[in-house]
Image: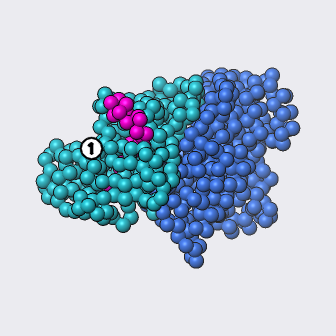
Chain colours: A cyan, B blue
Amino acid sequence: MPHDGDDTVLKGEDAIIALLAPLAERHSGAFGLKDDCALLAPPPGTELVLKTDPIAEGVHFLEDDAPEDIAWKALAVNVSDIVAKGARPLGYLMALSFPQPPARSWMSRFAEGLRAAQEALACHLMGGDTDRRAGPLTISITMIGAVAAGRMVQRATAKPGDRLFVSGTVGDAALGLLLARDTALAASWKLTPADAEHLLARYRRPSPRLPLAPLLLDHANAAMDVSDGLVKDLERMLRASSASAHLDAACIPLSGPARRIAALSPDWLGRLITAGDDYEVLCAVPPDKIVALASAAAAAGIPLTDIGTVAEKDPATLTVMGPGGGPLALPERTGWDHF
Amino acid sequence: MPHDGDDTVLKGEDAIIALLAPLAERHSGAFGLKDDCALLAPPPGTELVLKTDPIAEGVHFLEDDAPEDIAWKALAVNVSDIVAKGARPLGYLMALSFPQPPARSWMSRFAEGLRAAQEALACHLMGGDTDRRAGPLTISITMIGAVAAGRMVQRATAKPGDRLFVSGTVGDAALGLLLARDTALAASWKLTPADAEHLLARYRRPSPRLPLAPLLLDHANAAMDVSDGLVKDLERMLRASSASAHLDAACIPLSGPARRIAALSPDWLGRLITAGDDYEVLCAVPPDKIVALASAAAAAGIPLTDIGTVAEKDPATLTVMGPGGGPLALPERTGWDHF
């Protein structure tokens, strides 16, 4: 975490809480961050959808990333999960662990980024905790969303015959991370400044697909967010659903810059569809609902791409066919696994 | 985190999740830890009370602490907050951050400790996340409890004239931490083995006062758990409630061993009442409810001690009188503050 050298260091948890309290002022159950706990009155007729997904410096963001971007990403990765269940975000708890007391300027910018993110993502800070310990700066957010009772869209409920759709494009964030670490890649990839900016933004500012949530409720048999790589996450959906699928890699949606980079070497396509941090939505849709979903998604301005069909379990595999007609070579450990 | 040298290291998040899944089997909305999110149907007529309080190696537990104890403490510190609000725990999300893949034996023992804790503390694992990053082993639990709608016991609602009560004894855990770091202290403090065991257990295995929750609902104007030291937490309650208090240090409940240690040097009393990790309950009770609360607490086997009276704000201070008649000397930074 970079500190502005000329800035004062915040003294005490209370000084940090004071900068965060405005983020909680629209949730009465946050008690201005002055109680031990937060209170949430669930909206009538709803069930709560809960997710916790911490992000840490060096793993999910880089030391010199802007505080505003770190805050945005911390919130967005959790909203992404909630949205993929057909739920709408309500609020979140946030635990901050600092290796050293933050500078006031860093903390102010972080709070400002969080304010922008929670306005865009329709949720409010409800409570949290702040402590100091060795190790990387870590932001642990627990997001609470609401969904009509009995209607959460699960992962394990894809059915044979369902078509598989993914929102947006995959692989951009992985390219953005590589670029953030080594800006010289922009030249070797022949990127325009706008291309490079697009890929970096996809890494730093994922945009959960909020308007997709109600459409998933109405049209999808199963859904999940794509955060550990399309291949790995689709394998999880298939395993949970006891099903198989056969994809044509050429049908997997890539952005313009990603497509041009993929053309540079045959390895790239496999890397892009197994890389993490996409925060797009993967869903399984029964054939009789495809037209309605496609039309509603188009009206909402959300690109959805048909990438394949769910098959019976036997054989219980995911096969990805490459441009040459045979199975695509994938990196040995597909998808992001921390271990 | 110690690893048994002869043990296999767990490969992959799925192997860790497999060891934790039995902890979630009694919560249908955990989906066997096979979905992205957890689902919670709030009990009718309730509101939800939420708390997140991560614990980290080197701060809240020591490297060679038993995995069972670490798990217990991670859960107990969060249940403690919920109980002090008059709520009952329902379930929790847990994010584990490992600096290196855990050994199977460590993870099995951790899961066993968590199983014992969640049985004792009446809650279930609902979901979570596991990742690997540099820095200390960190266990981030978010606890969700339920309370009858409109009845959560707040921190900011103590009234002038209320009597202040604290459950159990304070300072034991701080002594336990000192002992855990330096076992030779047991001899210089002239502790029996049972004394030492008591203090260590208070540090490693805090016992949230679950049966106190319904009594707080019925009898307390305000309550909070004591986790950062009695003085600091009481100051927070008073500040939030715009009130003052005057305590006699001699009335603050200490255990037998703590009382004997306090007699060794005049500094000890101030240290014990400003030290963290007590996980007892502090509450403010209107005079007409004291008898009913005392009798119900006695019936439930919970020691409650009257430590003082809430006064009008002016002067807005907490004064602690020492044994000599004047204000007690307190350590300069009272209570645990991470910054």
Tell me the quarter of the picture where residue B177 sits: bottom right
Camera sees residue A312: yes
Camera sees residue A232: no
Does the magenta run of residues contain A295?
yes
SS label for mark 1: helix
> Which residue is the site of mark 1?
A201
Return the x and y of residue B164 as percentages of the image width and height: 73, 32
Does the magenta run of residues contain A170?
no
Tell me if residue A308 comes above or below residue B106 in the rendering.
Answer: above
Return the x and y of residue B251 as percentages of the image width and height: 77, 40
In this orientation, which residue lies closer to the viewer: A145 or A71?
A145
Residue at 13%, 47% (x, y): give it: A192
Residue at 67%, 47% (x, y): give it: B26
Q: Which residues are magenta?
A: A273-297
> Amino acid under label 1?
Ala
Read off the chain for label 1: A
Tell me the quarter of the picture where residue B168 sits: top right
Tell me if residue A268 comes above or below residue B87 in the rendering.
Answer: below
Return the x and y of residue A160 as percentages of the image width and height: 46, 48
Looking at the figure, which quarter contains the C terminus of chain A? Answer: bottom left
Is A238 placed left or right of B334 in the picture?
left
In this orientation, which residue lies closer to the viewer: A96 or A204?
A204
In this orientation, which residue lies closer to the viewer: B232 or B102?
B102
